[in-house]
Image (cartoon, rainbow, N blue to C red):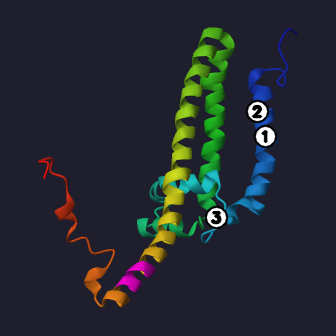
Amino acid sequence: DDGVSFVQSIFGASLLLYVAWFIPYMIWLLAIGLDLPKNNGRFDTVFHANMRNGLCVRFGTLFFNRPIERSIELNKTNEFEMRDLGVYITGHVLGYIASLLLLAYPCSLSRYVHGSLLFVCTLMCTWRGGQRYTYYSTKMYSQLIRKEFAVDLQSVDDALSNDFGGDDVSMNNRDCDDQFIDDGDGG
């Protein structure tokens, strides 16, 4: 027999590696991961981030006939249904197998295909990583900073209002801002 054993094939070895990752990951996700971001938790998971990014509404509409309002509520609380996890994980497994057939197999046939795919993957990972970093550094943390400064600015507004005796002396009163706009006429 000149055939390659299942474990020695690209498909078999990759599938075994995936299963070796998948089983502990599912145990962790079910035991710990699902509860991490609930109710303003400090930690997030890829599952929760993807569900909040529109998958919850899509899954609810396509598979479960769930009202959109219910899906939006699940997004707010991060308490997704187990059937959402089931669809998500099934899609993950099917996507993995499809990538083996559509990407790994052609790469095993040609180093040029392999090199091209590595180049495209590098570009995609760099782009997506940059987007995620931008999200963490601007959107997520800016909300916390705005909330902190809102408290401080409200204190300044209250102090000015008390010291000068009126609501029109507030930091939020911007009625006179247009007087100080430089219109370029030099005056």
For badge 3, the amino acid type reads: Pro
Task: Name the magenta segment's main secondary structure.
Answer: helix
Image position of 187 (left or right of 151): left
- Camera-side residue of 18 and 53: 53
**Above or below for 126 versus 169:** above
Of residues 4 and 144, the one drawn nearer to the viewer in this rendering: 144
Position of residue 169 measured from the top left corner of the image (x, y, whole percent): 29, 81
The answer to whether residue 169 is above or below residue 61 is below
Identify residue for label 2: 15
Q: Which residue does the numbered mark 1 point to in the structure image?
A: 19
**Element type where label 3 sits in the image:** loop
User: In what element is the residue under mark 2?
Assistant: helix
Which residue corresponds to mark 3? Answer: 37
Q: Nearer the viewer, residue 47 or 84?
A: 47
Left or right: residue 1 versus residue 19 is right
Q: Is residue 38 left or right of residue 157?
A: right
